[in-house]
Amino acid sequence: MGTQESRESQEPGGRDRGTGRRALLGAAVLGAGGAVLGLSGTARADERHGGGQGGGFRGLPKPTVIGHRGASGYRPEHTFGSYQLALDMGADVVEAGDLVPTKDGHLVCRHEPEIGGTTDVSAHPEFADRRTTKTLDGVPTTGWFTEDFTLAELKTLRAVERIPANRPNNTLYNGRWEIPTFEEVLHWQDEQTRKRGKQVWIYPETKHPTYFRALGLGLEERLAKVLRKHGKDGKNSPVIVQSFEPTSIQRLDKLIGNPLVVLLSAANTRPWDFVATGDPRTVADLVKPAGLKWIASYAQGIGPTLDLVIPKDANGALTAPTTLVADAHRAGLILHPYTMRNENVFLPADFRKGTDPNAYGDAFGAFRTYFATGIDGVFSDNADTALLARADFVNG
């Protein structure tokens, strides 16, 4: 995606690649059971963001299992069906959601502001004239954009599977759920916390904040306002906020007390806010000790692509781990890399099984290898697999 890779950089061929099937693994409702690994490294001296290991986000099970856009391996992403299934499987945290604004300023949960691939908007003739081409973080993008719709209009749409070629079974659920607002997510979080008798955690992301600020739709202030309204803007609040743009996290650090995480894409890329402001640093600079120390001055964690933890060779097989985990822990940062998926096409080459790109490979072997690096958690489309893998790892 231009100079800033999205999480789909790990998805060869995107939504057009391959056909095939996948089988649902049995749900492992493990919750936080089993031994908990301690957090490596020295915690940041600043206690404002819940620095003690016993409280706040540092008290989550380790390695933490984060349901990526819910249980997106089994349901259309960023729907209450996906979020609910992730919780039912036992995810420690649910990534609910990727936040983008509507024309009238509401925050809604979509992977991208362009919604042609994640909703049925193309089947709505009344919105045909909204289809347009915009430059999104330097990339010409054609489709329908949330900022051109009011919330009432978006609520007439229904979610669909984003990568149907890879996950055809998920299309069974097309049209079942509407687009959730972030405020609805916070109500859902409270409801589920009461029902389950344990705190439900969520992990929203500000999407393309520089792009939206230029449109007069600044994300950070809107997010802070909603969190304050619901009393979830403190250091121990069960809401971790992330962004690919460091300046968005810096802005949030001044607005809210929540734990904050900087997402990091491929080493040779630059965050889009750096491109926009002329900051010459690349992700490779940010993962050096000096860059990590800088991030730790306003954030509590990083969300690196898995390739920054263990690079791949020219054939797509894993090589030796980098020093990122140790370096980040030394700076007092936690690491929640992204994204583990069960299908061959998304796994390192040495963990694929058979020739069907969409069949499940040796996901357990891949999890074991990544967990062994000392990461504090991982985003996964398949929370049930991740929880079983964690149980194997923690229990030896």
Image: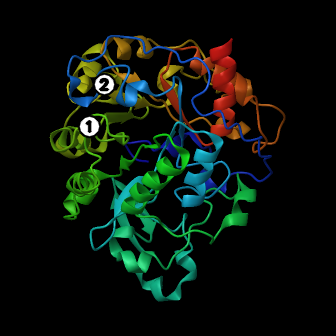
> Disc 1 on helix, strand or loop?
helix
Q: Residue furthest bottom?
A: 126
Q: Position of residue 271 (x, y in %)?
A: 31, 39
Q: Is residue 37 above or below residue 73?
A: above
Q: Residues within 10 Å of mark 1 (few under 14, many from 20)?
A: many
Q: How is the image coloured?
A: rainbow
Q: CA distance from mark 2 to mark 1?
A: 10 Å
Q: Which mark is residue 355?
A: none
For disc 2, the marked residue is 286
Which amino acid type corresponds to the residue marked 1 in the rendered image?
Answer: Pro
In the rendered view, does 355 fall on the left or right side of 223? right
Residue at 52% in and 56% down: 78
Q: Which sits earlier in the primary sequence, circle 2 or circle 1?
A: 1
For disc 1, the marked residue is 246
Say whether residue 385 is visible. Answer: yes
Q: Are marks 2 and 1 in contact (CB under 8 Å)?
A: yes
Q: Position of residue 34 (x, y in %)?
A: 62, 21
> Disc 2 on helix, strand or loop?
helix
Which amino acid type corresponds to the residue marked 2 in the rendered image?
Answer: Leu
For marks 2 and 1, give the one nearer the viewer.
1
Q: Position of residue 227 (x, y in %)?
A: 28, 52
Quadrant where the image shows the C terminus: top right
Residue at 44% in and 32% down: 266
Q: Is residue 110 above or below residue 287?
A: below
Quadrant hosting residue 152: bottom left
